[in-house]
Image: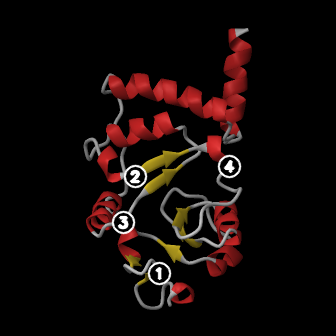
C-alpha cells in the first residue's frame, strides 16, 4: 500500500498536477524541512524590493498559488530575505478554484502560465506574463498576445490603478 501511494504521488508530480491534496502533502514536507532549517525559499533579486515598494506606495499584495496557503506561508516565512509575510495582505490557493478559472477585477495578475493569463484577461483583469529563466518557453503567439516582463522592476503601477510598464512595454494597458 505504501509503495502504491508513493507511486501515485510521483505520478501526480510528474504530470505537475495541481490537486489540493498533493499541494497539502507538499506543505507537510516543506514544513518539516523549513522548520528544521534545511530549506530557505529563494526569490529573484528584484521581487522583494518591488513588493516592498508597492507596499510603501499603499498597494495591497496578494498571493495566489497552486501551492497551499500553508505552503505559501512557509516559503515567505522562511526565505533568504528572512520572514517577509508582513508584505502580503492575503494568500489564496486552489480551494478557491484553479488559477485558470478566472480571477477578481481591478488587479494586476502576474503569471508565467499563458492559460492563467488567458483566464485572467477573460475576467477583465490586467495581465503580465513573467518570462524568467527556468520558466516554460512561450510560443511566438503568446509572446505577442501578452505584455511580457522579465523583472518586477519593469512594472510601473500608478496610483489610479492603471497598470503599465516603462514606455513601449505595456502600451495596450496605458490609460
| Mark 1 or 4, closer to the camera | 1
Q: Position of residue 55 (x, y in %)?
A: 31, 62
Sort mark 1 into few (<14), some (14-19) or many (20+) by Cα contacts within 10 Å: some
Give the image's coloring scheme: secondary structure
On the rendered image, what quadrant is the N terminus found in? top right
> What secondary structure is found at the residue carrying circle 3?
loop
The residue tagged 4 is 98
| Horizontal and vertical percent position of residue 62 | 45, 55
Q: CA distance from mark 3 to mark 1?
A: 12 Å
Q: Which mark is residue 112?
A: none
Horizontal and vertical percent position of residue 41: 37, 42
Give residue 151's quadrant in the image.
bottom left
Q: In the rendered image, which residue does mark 3 sit on?
A: 59
Cα–Cα gap, marks 3 and 4: 25 Å
Question: On the image, numbered disc 2 is attached to which residue?
Answer: 89
Q: Residue drawn 70% across and 13% down?
A: 3
CA distance separating discs 1 and 4: 26 Å
Question: Residue at the spot x=31%, y=57% of the render?
Answer: 48
Vertical placement of residue 173 versus 93, above or below: below
Separation of residues labelled 2 and 4 (CA atoms): 20 Å
Q: Residue at x 70, y 64 (%)?
A: 119
Crowding at dot 4, Cα within 10 Å, few <14 / some 14-19 / many 20+, comes out as some
Q: Are marks 3 and 4 in contact (CB under 8 Å)?
A: no
Given contact means CB atoms under 8 Å apart, are the residues at marks 3 and 1 in contact?
A: no
User: Which sits earlier in the primary sequence, circle 3 or circle 4?
Assistant: 3
SS class, disc 2: loop
Label for residue 162? 1
- Eye-nearest disc, 3 or 4: 3
86, above or below 108, in the image:
above
Amino acid at each position: 500500500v505504501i509503495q502504491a501511494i508513493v507511486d501515485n504521488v510521483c505520478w501526480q508530480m510528474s504530470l505537475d498536477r495541481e490537486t489540493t491534496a498533493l499541494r497539502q502533502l507538499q506543505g507537510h514536507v516543506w514544513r518539516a524541512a523549513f522548520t528544521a532549517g534545511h530549506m530557505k525559499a529563494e526569490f529573484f533579486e528584484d521581487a522583494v524590493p518591488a513588493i516592498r515598494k508597492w507596499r510603501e506606495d499603499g498597494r495591497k499584495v496578494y498571493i495566489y498559488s497552486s501551492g497551499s496557503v500553508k505552503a505559501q506561508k512557509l516559503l515567505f516565512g522562511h526565505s533568504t530575505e528572512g520572514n517577509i509575510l508582513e508584505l502580503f495582505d492575503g494568500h489564496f490557493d486552489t480551494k478557491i478554484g484553479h488559477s485558470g478559472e478566472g480571477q477578481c477585477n481591478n488587479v494586476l495578475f502576474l503569471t508565467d502560465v499563458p492559460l492563467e493569463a488567458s483566464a485572467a484577461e477573460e475576467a477583465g483583469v490586467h495581465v503580465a506574463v513573467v518570462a524568467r529563466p527556468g520558466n516554460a518557453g512561450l510560443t511566438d503567439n503568446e509572446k505577442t498576445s501578452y505584455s511580457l516582463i522579465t523583472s518586477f522592476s519593469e512594472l510601473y503601477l500608478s496610483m489610479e490603478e492603471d497598470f503599465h510598464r516603462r514606455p513601449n512595454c505595456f502600451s495596450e494597458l496605458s490609460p
